Image: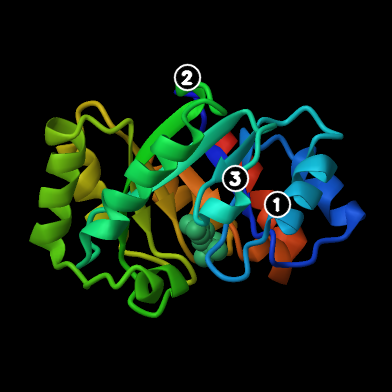
Amino acid sequence: MNAWQHIFKLDPAKEISDEHLEMVCESGTDAIIVGGTDNITLDGVLDLLSRIRRYTVPCILEISSMDAITPGFDYYYIPMVLNSKEKKWMMDIQHQAIKEFVDMLEYSELLFEGYCILNKDAKAFIHTNSYLPDEDDVIAYAYMADKVFHLPVFYMEYSGTYGDPVLVEKVKAQLEHSLLFYGGGIETVQQAREMKEHADVIIVGNRIYTDIKQALKTVKAVKDS
Ligand code: 1GP
């Protein structure tokens, strides 16, 4: 997992044809994350899981709803939203999930992500009652993820909009141990390359649904760079 560079994120609440799903799974990406914010149901998650399982690509559930947790994934990513104004999204939901599901999930399959949501219009930002941190705030969160909480991943989440590569570079310089994940608004080969220059892993989501060909090109773009 430490050598991963590119991940596609599929939303169980969105439709994807078998043909496009095959393209995504066979694209050479390092893994597929199943995750989203709205209308996440167990049926939707199970349907996508069984369809992705036809392929060999590793499959991860990013847990956003306790009602949609199921065995069968290779890994489970659990966001801890550092810039939420409510402790619930940083600590309490995760605490509850561990209490309820600890027997079902192997510890080695779990990965806690220090999430920093940086697009104020993103559904996840609104849903988790987050505030928009300034640059110094973000860098301090990166420090906390890396050196206080020792989280394996610090995730700069711009979901739906393209972020600031200069800030991504500054955050990367702050991290000694945590991997830097960047996600949000990657639509072109150039954007994929620009963010991958500093982030360890880029995550491409929405582009799969708006222009599958461009989305697929982001894989080669980062693998060749
Ligand atoms: C969303 O970070 C991912 O959680 C990817 O964002 O959908 O904007 O590509 P996009």
* Mark earlier in primary sequence (1, 2): 1
- In this view, the mark in front (2 or 3): 3
Does residue 204 appear in this view?
no
Q: Amino acid at mark 2?
A: Ser
Q: Residue at x 40, y 36 (%)?
A: 99
Q: State whether residue 3 is above or below residue 31.
A: above
Residue 113, image quadrant: top left
SS for callout 1: helix
Using the image, determine if residue 209 lies above or below residue 220. below
Residue under pointer 1: 45
Left/right placement of residue 170 relative to residue 51 reads left
How many neighbours does mark 2 have within 10 angstroms: few (below 14), some (14-19), or many (20 or more)?
few
Residue 224 or residue 145, whichever sits in front: 145
Mark 2 to mark 3: distance in Å? Answer: 16 Å
Left or right, 205 with reference to 85: right
Q: Residue at x 69, y 54 (%)?
A: 42
- The residue carrying mark 3 is 69
- Residue depicted at x 68% and y 51%: 217
For label 1, count other residues whose C-alpha is less than 10 Å away and answer few (under 14), some (14-19) or many (20+). many
Q: Give me the disc on residue 175.
A: none
Which callout, 3 or 1, points at the residue further toward the start of the chain? 1
